[in-house]
């Protein structure tokens, strides 16, 4: 399961991993009811759950990318083998992440824009769930990489 903020490369990484690992990959964005500025509350959970089960039937793994993945895990009662937090960062930010772990490095980058309702949901999720701290692994993209 890949978690992280909108636009930080979760789907891009999922697509690369599913190719390299020869397994299925699902993007939770594809299951969000259109014309909404929410995420977890707008997920078509029955459809997503069905696709997860269908993909797992012939294989032993499926990679899922999602904003607010921890909440999605709870909502779908999933037990991921691994939770990876994906973060887009500059070399300068990477150095500060390593040297200053007490700073909120999950704050949105300057210039990032997401819909107001989704922004609130993502901010609340990061504040209450602490996905970076609960992740089994962290994956940092260089800011210069375009998805």
Image: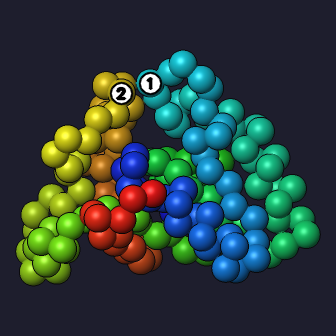
Residue 79 shows in this picture: no
Could you say where residue 102 lies in the image, as x and y percent from the top left?
Answer: 10, 68
Q: In this figure, which residue is indicated by the disc labeled 2?
A: 115
Up/down of 38 relative to 5, above or below: above
Is residue 11 shown left or right of residue 63? Answer: left
Could you say where residue 135 lies in the image, as x and y percent from the top left?
Answer: 41, 70
Residue sitting nearer the eye, 3 or 146: 146
| Separation (CA) of disc 2 from disc 1 | 6 Å
Residue 45 shows in this picture: yes
Quadrant in the picture for residue 45: top right
In the rendered image, the residue lying farthest to the top is 35
Residue sitting nearer the eye, 70 or 17: 17
Could you say where residue 91 lies in the image, as x and y percent from the top left?
Answer: 18, 74
Q: In this figure, which residue is indicated by the disc labeled 1?
A: 37
Residue at the image position 46 percent from the left and 70 percent from the top: 84
Which circle marks residue 103 in the picture?
A: none
Is residue 11 shown left or right of residue 56? Answer: left
Quadrant in the picture for residue 118: top left
Could you tell me which quadrant the C terminus lies in? bottom left
Instruction: Determine whether the residue tagged by mark 1 lies in a helix, strand or loop.
Output: loop
Up/down of 31 relative to 91, above or below: above
In the rendered image, the residue lying farthest to the right is 58
Residue at the image position 82 percent from the left and 65 percent from the top: 56
């Amino acid at each position: 399961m890949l978690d992280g903020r909108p636009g930080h490369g979760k789907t891009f990484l999922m697509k690369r991993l599913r190719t390299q690992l020869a397994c299925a990959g699902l993007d939770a964005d594809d299951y969000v009811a259109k014309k909404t500025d929410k995420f977890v509350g707008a997920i078509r959970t029955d459809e997503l759950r069905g696709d997860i089960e269908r993909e797992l039937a012939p294989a032993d793994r499926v990679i899922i990318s999602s904003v607010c993945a921890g909440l999605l895990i709870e909502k779908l009662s999933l037990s991921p083998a691994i939770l990876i937090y994906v973060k887009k960062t500059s070399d300068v930010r990477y150095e500060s992440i390593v040297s200053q772990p007490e700073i909120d490095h999950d704050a949105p980058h300057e210039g990032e824009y997401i819909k107001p309702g989704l922004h609130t949901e993502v901010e609340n999720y990061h504040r209450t769930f602490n996905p970076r701290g609960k992740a089994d692994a962290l994956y940092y993209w260089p800011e210069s990489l375009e998805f």
